[in-house]
Amino acid sequence: MVGMVLLSIFLAMFTGAVLMMNNAMTKSQAVSLTASQLNVAFLAMDSTVRDAAFISTPRKGKTTGDWYVELRGADAGTEVCTQLRVDIATQQLQRRSWTVVKAVASAPTAWVPISSGISNGGASAGTAGQPFALVPPRANEVFQQLRITLVSPAGSGSSLTTSTSSFTLTALNSVIPAPTAPICQQQGWP
């Protein structure tokens, strides 16, 4: 009888330890997944923003409520427009582009996912969770800067984790003050 009681206590302790290790492993995997998604987003946008000659004012779409920002660059003298958005429905950071030759825009490419699991596409303007924001220029700055804040949840139940990454990228081909005429507005905000 004493042996069975001791064995029961040992099995309960062992089962509890195994469950705690499983929860810790699941939480660790969720953190790793969110960090991976945010790293993929950073790497994809780093060169896109750095090569930009102009960054538009970020806004929300008229019908979808998704956040958008347009970047103007050049390729062999042709204006290239890139539009980034955080799609609320699919929870993806996406990109599409088009060219403009003599004020005539080509058809945009299809939306291409950059990163999945991005949950702050519906953030309110002016909040810390706003995905795209122009950084106000300070004295002696010569380039435009775009602050990108992405929130990525992963896991479920007690292993649910949310990672937030905020980074500022500099458009090295831009100038301050920025042009006042609208740029890359041929496709609009859906």
Image (cartoon, rainbow, N blue to C red):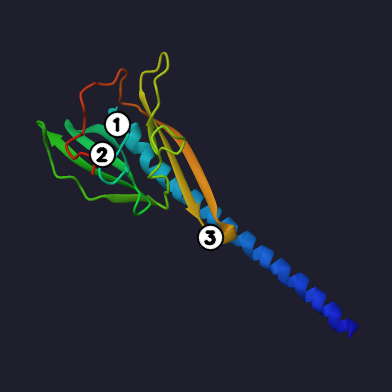
Q: Earlier in the sequence, mark 3 or mark 2?
A: 2
Secondary element under disc 1, as helix, strand or loop, is: loop
Amino acid at dot 1? Ala
Determine whether 168 is above or below 142 in the image: below
Which one is in front in this view, the residue at disc 3 or the one at disc 1?
3
Within 10 Å of the Cα at label 1, are there few (<14), some (14-19), or many (20+) other Cα atoms?
A: many
The quarter of the displayed image where residue 98 is located: top left
Amino acid at dot 2? Thr
Q: Which residue is mark 2?
A: 82
Left or right: where 26 falls relative to 97: right
The residue under the point 21% across, 27% down is: 182
Q: Earlier in the sequence, mark 2 or mark 1?
A: 1
The residue under the point 42% across, 45% down is: 120
Residue at the outermost top position? 139
The residue under the point 39% across, 20% down is: 137
Spatial separation of the CA atoms under disc 2 and disc 1:
9 Å
Spatial separation of the CA atoms under disc 3 and disc 2:
35 Å
Q: Which mark is residue 156?
A: 3
The residue under the point 18% across, 45% down is: 108
Spatial separation of the CA atoms under disc 3 and disc 1:
38 Å
Secondary element under disc 2, as helix, strand or loop, is: strand
Secondary element under disc 3, as helix, strand or loop, is: loop
Q: Quadrant of the C terminus?
A: top left
Task: Give how far across and how far down residue 74 sits, in percent.
Answer: 22, 32
Task: Give how far across and how far down residue 83 sits, in percent.
Answer: 27, 40
- In this rendering, the count of numbered labels is 3
Q: Which residue is mark 1?
A: 52
Determine whether 162 is above or below 5 in the image: above
Task: Give how far across and how far down residue 59 sits, in percent.
Answer: 31, 35
Q: Earlier in the sequence, mark 3 or mark 1?
A: 1
